Amino acid sequence: MIETPQVRPGLVTHTEPMPRVIAYFYNSAQGNLAIQLLTSMGIPNDRLGVTPPERIEGGQGMILSISCPDDTQIAQVEKLCRQFGAEIHRQRR
């Protein structure tokens, strides 16, 4: 089954591939809080991928795929996600 992609309104100014941090939260409430803090620190909302608990085997947790506009934000993103108990992985370019 193929799902229709979500289209979000707004102008995308940065179209080159960005480095990504993949964060697995065991508790989706912590993942939701991390989303709020990530967007407040400048992570583009249109480059934030979310896999909700109902799409994860066992129905718990949350996976965030976080695009970082520059390499300096990678460390900040990883630190913030770890503070909320996430398991961190980096996606290679």
Image: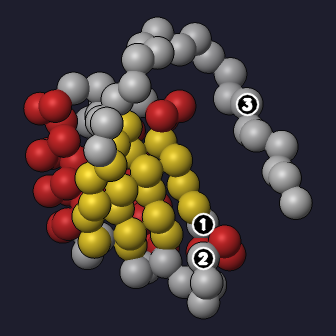
Which image quadrant for residue 18? Answer: top left
The residue that mark 2 highlights is 56
Q: Amino acid at mark 1?
A: Pro
Q: Position of residue 61 (x, y in %)?
A: 49, 77
Residue 34: percent from the left, percent from the top?
A: 35, 57
Q: Label 2, label 3: how many angstroms apart (C-alpha)?
A: 22 Å
Is residue 76 visible from the viewing direction of this image?
yes
In the rendered image, which residue does mark 1 sit on?
A: 52
**Quarter of the figure that contains the N terminus:** bottom right
> Decide: marks 2, 3 in contact (CB < 8 A)?
no
Q: Name the residue at 73% across, 30% down.
A: 7
Quadrant position of residue 52: bottom right
Q: Which residue is mark 3?
A: 7
Q: Secondary structure at mark 2?
A: loop
Left or right, 5 with respect to 43, comes to right
Q: Judging from the image, what secondary structure is the residue with disc 3 in?
A: loop
| Residue at image point 57% right, 61% down | 51
Query: Is disc 1 in contact with disc 2, using a CB cutoff of under 8 Å?
Result: yes
